[in-house]
Image (spheres, helix red, strand yellow):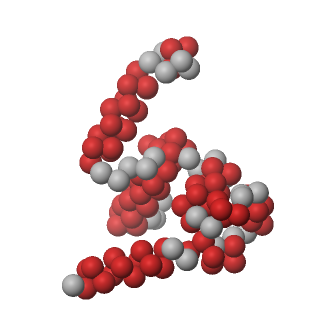
């Protein structure tokens, strides 16, 4: 019962998230947000995607960051693992991966595209 209640509360509050978003944005994010139409600015997911795209934080940049991450210096392994999980979650969100099937397709497509020569990859 509590799980369903938590889901309901999460979904209820998600419907009003867009109203509170502008107060949390920095100057560059706010410039991107103000370029959205009224309807787009009322949809949290649309606004979030526009802001992330404005900062070039798309799925390819998240994947590149994930692939190049490594533990450095005095950072502990637990913190490094948490950072890996956070960047992976950003990639899943940017790529709209919400099931094992979409993860599987993204994994195969990434390897397929990486195996193609540059001139062929431009046409795929």
* Residue at position x 43%, y 50% in the image: 96
Q: Position of residue 4 (x, y in %)?
A: 27, 79
Residue 77 in the image: above or below residue 9:
above
Give the farthest residue toward the front.
Answer: 39
* Residue at position x 32%, y 44% in the image: 103
**Taking the image as drawn, is residue 28 in sight?**
no
Would residue 101 be found to the left or right of residue 84 on screen?
left
Number of numbered labels in the structure image:
0
Q: Position of residue 88 (x, y in %)?
A: 41, 53
Q: Position of residue 26 (x, y in %)?
A: 73, 69
Of the pair 66 and 105, the residue shown nearer to us: 105
Q: Quadrant of the N terminus?
A: bottom left
Q: Quadrant of residue 16?
A: bottom right
Of the pair 12 and 111, the residue shown nearer to us: 12
* Residue at position x 63%, y 50% in the image: 53
Give the farthest residue toward the left.
Answer: 1
* Residue at position x 33%, y 37% in the image: 105
Q: Quadrant of residue 76?
A: bottom left
Of the pair 4 and 67, the residue shown nearer to us: 4
Q: Position of residue 67 (x, y in %)?
A: 44, 43
**Taking the image as drawn, is residue 51 in sight?**
yes
Would residue 21 be found to the left or right of residue 34 on screen?
left
Would residue 73 be found to the left or right of residue 34 on screen?
left
Residue 80 in the image: above or below residue 11:
above
């Amino acid at each position: 019962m509590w799980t369903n209640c938590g889901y309901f509360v999460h979904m209820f509050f998600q419907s009003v998230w867009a109203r509170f978003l502008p107060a949390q944005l920095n100057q560059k994010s706010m410039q991107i947000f103000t370029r959205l139409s009224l309807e787009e600015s009322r949809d949290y997911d649309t606004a979030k995607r526009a802001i992330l795209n404005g900062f070039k934080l798309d799925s390819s940049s998240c994947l590149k960051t994930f692939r190049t991450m490594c533990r450095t210096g005095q950072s502990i392994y637990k913190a490094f693992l948490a950072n890996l999980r956070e960047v992976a979650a950003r990639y899943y969100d940017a790529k709209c991966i919400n099931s094992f099937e979409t993860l599987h397709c993204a994994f195969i497509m990434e390897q397929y595209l990486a195996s193609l020569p540059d001139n062929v990859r431009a046409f795929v």
